[in-house]
Image: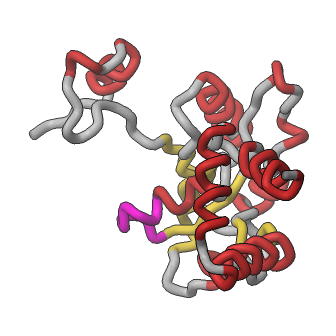
Amino acid sequence: MPAIDELIAELSRLPGIGRKTAQRLTYHLLKSSPAEARRLAGALVRVATEVRACTRCGNLSDRDPCEYCRDPRRSTDQLCVVEEASDIAAIEKSGNYRGTYHVLGGRLSPLDGIGPEQLNISPLLERLRDGVRELIIATNPSVEGEATATYLHRIVVPIESVRVTRLARGLPVGGDLEYADGVTIAEAFAGRREM
């Protein structure tokens, strides 16, 4: 059945979706009403045709500038740099940050051929000269994320008016020490604070 096989193949190309999950999703869609399948197809088409990177920050949005860049209540003197647009949603869930964002579009990874030229760094440097007082580096705590944070720190330090900070790392709430790796425990010790 070529149509079913084609859908399974396309779904299995999505991150985190293996062939078995793609197969389950396909058969779920086949059991659904045609109206439900059309709604899903319409949403996919709208995302593909209407969502673009914000020309100011790189966030994905159906409007330009995006909702965060347009919001006059957001502080423009704080700029949080993230690897991907999806990282913004995680930060926003906390409800603690009211500054603006800048999306790099990835992280440094020489083994994958990703250097500074492939990232959204030049516009970041331009934005830092527009009254930003603090750059918050929120790259992932991976080897590549750390390399990216170190690189950004090195190129931003000469801009004396900008303070460079990094998100704290450590033990998650509800986590057990016995299951934490050594690097996480070391970071938790280094970031400890008065009670």
Q: Is residue 32 above or below residue 173?
A: below
Q: Is residue 39 magenta?
A: no
**What is the x, y in percent for residue 113?**
88, 27
Is 77 left, or right, of 96 in this rendering? right
Q: Is residue 92 magenta?
A: yes
Q: Which residue reaches farthest front?
A: 1
* Residue 97 occupies quadrant: bottom left
**What is the x, y in percent for residue 150?**
64, 29
Residue at point 86%, 76% (across, down): 49
Q: Is residue 20 above or below residue 44?
A: above
Is 22 left, or right, of 188 in this rendering? right
Q: Nearer the viewer, residue 160 or 173?
A: 173
Q: Nearer the viewer, residue 155 or 12?
A: 12
Quick check: can you spot residue 171? yes
* Residue 106 occupies quadrant: top right
Which range is magenta?
91-98
